[in-house]
Image (tube, grey):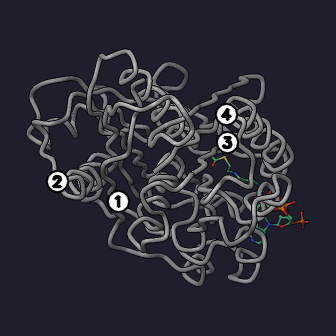
Amino acid sequence: MIRSVVCGFGAALPKRAMANAEIEGIVETSDEWIVQRTGIRQRHIADETETTASLGEAAARQALDNAGLTVADIDMIILATSTPDNTFPATAVNIQSRLGMHHGFAFDLQAVCSGFVFAVTTADNYIKTGLARRVLVIGAETFSRILDWTDRTTCVLFGDGAGAIILEAQQGEGTTADRGILTAHLRSDGSHMEKLYVDGGPSSTGTVGQLRMQGREVFKHAVGMITDVIEAAYEATGLTSQDIDWFVPHQANRRIIEASAKKLGIAPEKVILTVDRHGNTSAASIPLALHHAASEGRIQKGDMVLLEAMGGGFTWGSVLLRW
Ligand code: ACO
């Protein structure tokens, strides 16, 4: 059977890193509060020359180099983002053009912090149905542009950045020993919209709007939703937490990540944590974490890797793959 195998990865961060101490000068907060409640120590913030498209392009170029490929080898681009450069056209098409790619097709996918998991699952299905052979999957965000910098309950949490992987069709045996995506599980429930949303948009207010969140409410639902989709992955494959080499969760909050790993029985040393240096970069957080861990040689070919995310909507999902 056809498997979608990771053959390259890349990442890009804005030049400017903003430490918690700097935010102390913007809203009434403290490094101690932020670290204790979230694990975040710094985040990167885009300057006026850096956008979702430019960061996504840089991550994509790095993934192509890492895979030893050029755009001629790519059939399709999916960009997971909630902070596109323009309302339309899709920022993925902008990135396609920046890469000098004039064949194939590109589109954006919007599932907020679960965006990368939704995009990887979508790419996997295009590959399995033979509609694409190699797909560039990017998560890129500039959440700093939709933050209310007077609201200390949200502005301390988020950062900007981009990550990318390339998925390639390879023949597998149809067992869990195969490299590539083994199973994926997606969920959404729009009745939770008011807990995490942006209070504007082209059709409602004609403005971009700013992020609004009931943090406690998000926290309350997060661990249950995360464990639900991971248990679905275990049920589909017969695997358990013992079989996982690396747990790469969406990096929203250290406490949510640690509580989820504990509930699932995943050992702390198998958890990839980058929220301390990146903050919550929404759809970019998982590919940034994958890039970080794979570049350090922690995630290696053949390792079992579990991805999960939960975010606005609510949306949530998991992907289990052999790297
Ligand atoms: N600095 C200092 N004090 C603060 C700050 C801040 N930045 N923010 C809030 N406080 C205060 C509050 O005003 C409150 O004070 P009060 O008790 O006098 O009213 C106190 O700290 C406690 O506030 P809570 O909101 O109850 O704090 P909590 O322990 O719940 O932590 C947090 C807040 C970190 C937002 C937590 O709820 C959380 O992590 N929620 C999940 C949010 C999340 O991860 N969202 C993203 C997931 S989806 C996505 O990625 C898009």
Mark 3 element type: strand
Label whose residue precedes the other's in the sequence (2 or 3): 2
Q: Which amino acid does label 1 sit on?
A: Ala
Near mark 1 (Cα within 10 A), the count class, few <14, some 14-19 or many ≥20, is many
Q: Which mark is residue 237?
A: 4
* Quadrant of the image where one finds ligand 1: bottom right
What is the three-letter code of the residue carrying label 2? Gly
Numbered disc in front, either 3 or 4: 4
Vertical comparison of 143 with 44: above or below: above
- Say if disc 3 is inside 8 Å of ligand 1: yes
Q: Alpha-carbon distance for marks 4 and 2?
A: 31 Å
For the residue pair 224 and 299, the one nearer the viewer reads as: 299
Residue 66 location, x and y as percent?
A: 24, 58
Mark 4 or mark 1: name the one nearer the start of the chain: 1
Which sits earlier in the primary sequence, circle 3 or circle 4? Answer: 4
- What amino acid is labelled 4 in the image? Thr
Mark nearest the camera among 4 and 1 is: 4
Disc 1 designates what residue?
Answer: 11
Instruction: Say the numbered circle drawn on residue 310.
Output: 3
Within 10 Å of disc 2 (Cα), the crowding (few <14, some 14-19, many 20+) is: few
Of callouts 4 and 2, which one flags the residue occurring earlier in the amino acid sequence?
A: 2
Q: State yes or no: Cβ of the residue under disc 2 lies below 8 Å from any atom of ligand 1.
A: no
Q: Would you say the residues marked 1 and 2 are in contact, meaning their CB atoms lie under 8 Å apart?
A: no
Which amino acid type is shown beneath numbered disc 3?
A: Met
